[in-house]
Image: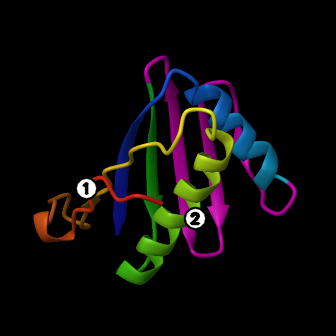
Amino acid sequence: MESHARVATEKAARYMTQLAKHWSHKFEVRYDEASAFFPLPAGNCRMTAHPDGLDITVEAVDLEGLARLEDVVAKHLDRFAFREGELQYGWTRAWAAGAVDPRAMRINVAH
């Protein structure tokens, strides 16, 4: 199962890199100036930084793990973005066949 969010921020690369450095002490993180991969205990997280936002995809084996990853990633990024206030995530969940289940969408969930 996957979940995707596009976070609007002009500091996407900065926040992604801060998170990569933070998690690199515990996990085998791979990152460069435009993308990052985080293998976490609950699943994987991929990020791509753009000038106007950050694309985030998390993967887990079940909905509980997916929700946990969404929350963990959002809470960590919000700590780095505290000067901006809470970022808006609007997670969209996709199933293995690539279809989106509208009932599983989490729009504008505050963290």
Residue 66, by quadrant, is bottom left
Disc 1 crowd rating (10 Å Cα; few below 14, some 14-19, many 20+) is few
| Disc 2: CA contacts within 10 A as few (<14), some (14-19) or many (>=20) | few
Q: Position of 89 compared to 101: left or right? A: right
68 vs 109: above or below: below
Q: Quadrant of residue 32?
A: top right
Where 93 falls versus 35 (above or below)? below
Is residue 20 found left or right of 5 in the rendered image? right
Kind of residue at disc 2: Val
For disc 2, the marked residue is 72
Q: Is residue 68 magenta?
A: no
Q: Left or right: 66 with respect to 32? A: left
Q: Which residue is more in the foreground, 24 or 28?
A: 24
Q: What secondary structure is marked by label 2?
A: helix
Identify the residue shown where x is 26% and y is 67%: 96
**In the figure, is residue 42 to the left or right of 21?**
left
Q: Residue at x 50, y 74 (%)?
A: 68
Q: Is residue 62 visible?
A: no
The residue where tag 1 is placed is: 107
Is the image coloured rainbow, by chain, by secondary structure, or in one colour?
rainbow
Label whose residue precedes the other's in the sequence (1 or 2): 2
Observer-nearest of 31 and 77: 77
Query: Percent x, y for residue 60?
Result: 45, 72
- Type of the residue with mark 1: Ile
Most extreme residue toward the top is: 51
The range drawn in magenta is 25-52
Q: Secondary structure at mark 1?
A: loop
Give residue 52's position: percent from left, percent from top. Answer: 43, 20
- Residue drawn at x 39%, y 44% is 88
